[in-house]
Amino acid sequence: MPENKTDITEHKNPFLEPYGTPHDTVPFDRIRLEDFEEAFMEGIRRDNELIEKTINNPDKPTFDNTIINADEDREGYYDLLSRVSTVFFNLLSAETNDDMDALAQKIQPILTQHANDVRLNRRLFERIKAVHRRHRKLTDEEKRLLDDTYDGFTRSGALLDDEGKERLRKLTEEASMLSLQFSQNLLKENKAFKLRITDREQLGGLPDSAIEAAALAAKEDGEEGWTFTLDYPSYNPFMTYSTERELRHRLYMAKNTECTHDNAENNIEICKRIVNLRREIAQLLGFRTYADYVLKHRMAGNKRSVYKLLNDLIDAYKPTAEREVRDLTMFAKKTEGIRFNPEPWDFSYYSHKLQLSKYKIDAEMLRPYFELSNVIKGVFGLATRLYGITFKENKDIPVYHPDVKAYEVFDNDGSYLAVLYADFFPRKGKQGGAWMTQYQGQWIDRKGVNVRPHVSIVMNLTKPTEEKPALLTLSEVETFLHEFGHALHGMFANTRFESLSGTNVWWDFVELPSQFMENYSVQQEFLNTFAFHYKTGEPMPENLIKGIVKSRNFMAAYSCLRQVSFGLLDMAYYTMRTPFEGDLVNFEKEAWKKAMVTPQLPDTCMTVQFSHIMAGGYAAGYYSYKWAEVLEADAFSVFKREGIFNTDTARRFREEILSKGGTEHPMTLYKRFRNGEPTIAALLRRNGIRRNKDEKR
């Protein structure tokens, strides 16, 4: 992790010279905190120099001297700003500290101002517009780049008058800072809470894995007893297994009231302001709502299509979801007495008990068979079996934390394909959740060299303890597969332009490769390749595998509606045409009530911790997960028909979808793989939800 250093030894800023590392990977071990600001400012200077060179070119504007000049110039000079920004903001999510946060507050407005300077540069846009109107014969990929470049400028205000441009600058700069503040507040609030237990009697029901992890957490804090946090590997087992209802209540409320308290980390007013800023930006650019602005470049296309998807899912799943909740409630009453009324902090607890009674299986039974090193072998082995690629850890590649592993990835012909970083465990300076990112994109330079990507997957999985290695739940295996699917999308990238490569696709298409990979988590043929007991080496018993398969749809309708509710909330904020001045908590509860099948608590609030739509790029796009789920279920049905390890099918999936990036319209790519358009039928069949018309088929 970069730190301030004041020693007198000569130090060269690693961003300002060739890295000199394997595959030109980031030299994390040589980066100091002060290097970032210097590199940012020099990167901006070089960017401005390139722009001046472009707009002062006396030659007639062409695709080659105007569009490519900005996207393809990768001679180790003009990519500096991208280079340092990528490293800094990736670390800000995965390994931050107070000094990094302070620098982010300082540098963010400078970067936003620079981005506005570029996109609102009248002379630069005039050249781009001239090329867009008249140009040489272009390849499909070149045409896509030209259209994206032109649209990017117009969607950033290039067509506004001077007064409009100045107003847009102020709005975007404020929105950028507030999104950063939102994320920093959420991280601080999340890490500040600790449930400390010193009485062993209060550990009732908890599995050994949770107790050992809590003991380790307490020891790391220099405390006695056991410490539980709001990080998923700690929070989820406690809510699932603890017999201490009052402690479940306390932990649940801590999690679901994050950033609502009367302190510096309160996000309520920040969220309201972010929503209003985005609406005003969209309307300034000529759109009725922010959703209209966003959906113009999405597969869904418009609000009507999004709401149709969400409402179709509600119609299809709600009756089953209501039955699932009734069954769980009756089970809880049968267990505790007819007067017992389960509360939200009881849901996971009784859901687990009901699942155990129905399928004789729970997450802890599976943990011994999901030791992390074996899971890594299984996931990598799946990619080898499908695509012929192989992985080799390279300890000479620098990493930013000892937990991180770096792998060289080789293609099926033995050639170098990519670098993959894998960051598995939660820690103090790391955001919650899981994500894929990259430190270098893929592109083909002017000399024809295919520059290969450096991809990273970041997760918060169960840590090893002093007694046991990292033993995962099935859900964590699914998370690994999900992020690995994104990684494959990045690693297989094979396009000319970096801005069109890998995961640079429309948001409601980007989740297809990731959610597709989750399907393998319940395939017996896959589990048989790696699910071995960490002590005995025995394979997972047949009855457990059957239990996994049979229980796949347990509470599936409820889970679906939960995702739909998030989509409804997102759309409610970003389809507003007038300023939002109401009560945020009440607005939230009204916005998603159509998808709700359980009572809502008055003091809880999702919005203030909903990073996806406030700081993560999914504003007016959270529906994408369900949109992509329709696609991936349909795609996996092809593999189910032709063989889940069928290499010819996998080759088509790689060539038609994973390697193409954003070079063509997503539906064009999908139909080329599928030989037809997707339908919702495969998803309904997979979840055990069937409409009459589907039954008749």
Image (cartoon, helix red, strand yellow):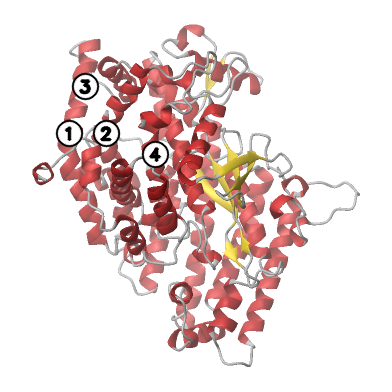
Choose the circle earlier in sequence order: 1 or 4: 1
- In the rendering, which numbered label is found on residue 518? 4
Q: Calculate the distance from the C-alpha at mark 1 to the C-alpha at mark 4.
A: 23 Å
Q: Residue at x 34, y 41 (%)?
A: 643
Where does the image place residue 417, in percent across and percent down from the top left? 59, 52
Q: Mark 3 Cα within 10 Å, few/some/many (few <14, many 20+)?
A: many
Q: Nearer the viewer, residue 312 or 182?
A: 312
Answer yes or no: do the residues labelled 2 and 1 have beta carbons within 8 Å? yes
**Would you name the residue on which mark 3 appears?**
329
Q: Mark 4 Cα within 10 Å, few/some/many (few <14, many 20+)?
A: many
Where does the image place residue 608, in percent across and percent down from the top left? 42, 44
Q: Which circle, 3 or 2, is nearer the viewer?
A: 2
Note whether 546 is above or below 573 in the view shown: above
Choose the circle earlier in sequence order: 3 or 2: 3
- For badge 2, the amino acid type reads Ala
**Would you name the residue on which mark 1 appears?**
320
**Would you name the residue on which mark 2 appears?**
556
Q: Calculate the distance from the C-alpha at mark 4 to the C-alpha at mark 2.
A: 14 Å
Horizontal side of 578 relative to 540 (left or right) equals left
Note whether 361 is above or below 315 in the view shown: above
